Amino acid sequence: MSVGDSDMLGVTIAGIKMKTPVMTASGTFGFGLEYKDFVNLNKIGAVVVKGTTLLPRSGNQGRRIAETPAGMLNSIGLENPGVDEFLSEILPRLKEYDVPVIVNISGNTVEEYGELAARLNVADVAGVELNISCPNVKEGGIAFGTNCDSASAVVKQVKSNTDLPVIVKLSPNVTDIVAMAQSVEDAGADAISLINTLLGMSIDIHKWRPVLGNVVGGLSGPAVKPIAVRMVWQVARAVKVPVIGMGGIVTAVDAIEFMLAGASAVAVGTANFINPCAAQSVADGMKDYIKQRGLSHVSELVGKVNL
Amino acid sequence: MPKMVVEARIVRNTEIGVNVKELVLYAPEIAVQAVPGQFLHVRVADSYYPLLRRPLSISGADHITGTVSTIYRVVGQGTACLAALTSKDSVDCMGPLGNGFVIHGQRPLLVGGGMGLAPLLFLAGALCPRPIEILMGGRTKEEMFWADMFHNKCDAIHITTDDGTLGSCGVTLDLLPDVLKSGAFDVIYTCGPRIMMKGVAKAAKTYNIPCQVSLEEYMACGIGGCLSCTCAGKDGLRKKVCTDGPVFWAQEVIS
């Protein structure tokens, strides 16, 4: 089947129709509006907004980022204005753009996840992404993200409280990523995104103190890409729901690697900090690659790694 | 006018002090917009290490020549990469970012320490022809090349050095009460070490003089997306240093 240029990249993930398979990773693109001067939001596959909680959070104290070789550590601590302000102040401005808005949510309890999902069950939200894996706060869902039973409970609660597609974002800080993926799939997840950041630490050798105020933080950036690609490959083979790959994607080459590993869509994270147009650049590069390879659609890449 | 990312040609990158360099970039789109207090966010190398951009205060902008300047100290890998660049190179530069100083009053006092003097240099030019006094501090005489840079912009320059090799021996806060007593200042602008700015803000409050502070924080995106650089506001809300600042009225962010 021959398709036009504009159709080469269009994908539908868990019922969410996107112009390109390149989303923005939560926490790296604010609420999208911060980037509007630099990038055409209408050309992004989906905007996954900053982790949102039931009540406003002020985040962690002290230094919040540290640069590391080919990566960065962050310990923002889920600073956000809370779901009510998101719905009343931010979402109305975001809906002026023709881009699916996926809300990343984080709760302290199973019930909080359910409550968040219920409040976000509105027409202008395209889907929710469950952050069951934020490593930077004690209540950031990490207890849910490293235990199959807890993760399942969260997914079931959310699924019963919303009609929206539910994406579950997995933590790489587990022994068996495949078991986690299968448990959330069994619980009803419509898609799985991975990986969240890896727990890391950096120490100032002059002060003999941790660099981050929170001592430990989440490692992201190109340094984590091989781990992310491996996990996407493992998970994509083991589940039927679509997998959204992320972790160190800076260029189209990186994104294509994830697609070949089995991702049906990808998300650009840390690269947004370096190049606000990264998601758009990655999509443009993917289109060039598809043409060069004589393919007609990006989906022809998914899971095609030859073993 | 929208903020932008440009490929800025380096006009010069010259040493002006010990481990301190002035970087002049040809970036007319940024130069025409820039106001004192704003910053550039510069990709210092086309590599993954250093990975992040570096925020650099704008020390001057000339929309006739289309240039924008910054002064930086070489302290780590990022600034070492920047220091190695020459006029044959270009850098990926975002800007101008953040909110600048509010031009206010008729008798300004500038108080700066270390590299905090860079944005004040740009500000001093914008405040002309008001009579400007500046109180500046550094560790030693060698660091006080700043005095020459401010010479034509200020009516009075008060200097302190930690070791007493130039001006008064001590820090700016030691001399600040004397300077405040001798002048009829109606606004204070300060940039430098946090402890200095806190002291300046406290003195300004005592003398009932409006005071603006320019904060510095580690930041990743520079445009309000990552929340790396937020600080506690007095109203109980977090402030983003990159987009709510870096310049704030002192009472917004300092107790």
Image: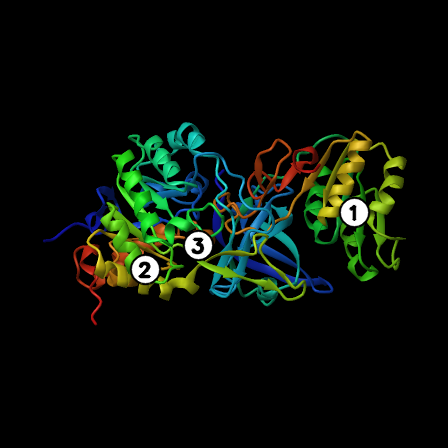
First in sequence, mark 3 or 2: give its number.
2
Secondary structure of the residue carrying tag 2 is helix
Q: Residue A45: in sight, yes or no?
A: no
From the viewer's perspective, tell me whether residue A237 is left or right of residue A57: left
Q: Chain of mark 3?
A: A
Q: Quadrant of residue B135?
A: top right
Q: CA distance from mark 3 to mark 2?
A: 22 Å
Circle on res. B152: 1
Q: Residue B234: in sight, yes or no?
A: yes
From the viewer's perspective, tell me whether residue B63 is left or right of residue A46: right
Q: Which residue is mark 2?
A: A177
Q: Relative to residue A122, is residue A213 depicted above or below?
A: below
Give the residue type at disc 3: Thr
Q: Position of residue A261 (x, y in %)?
A: 26, 63
Q: Which residue is mark 3?
A: A270
Mark 1 vs mark 3: tell me if same chain: no
Q: Looking at the figure, which quarter contains the C terminus of chain A?
A: bottom left
Q: Quadrant of residue A225?
A: bottom left
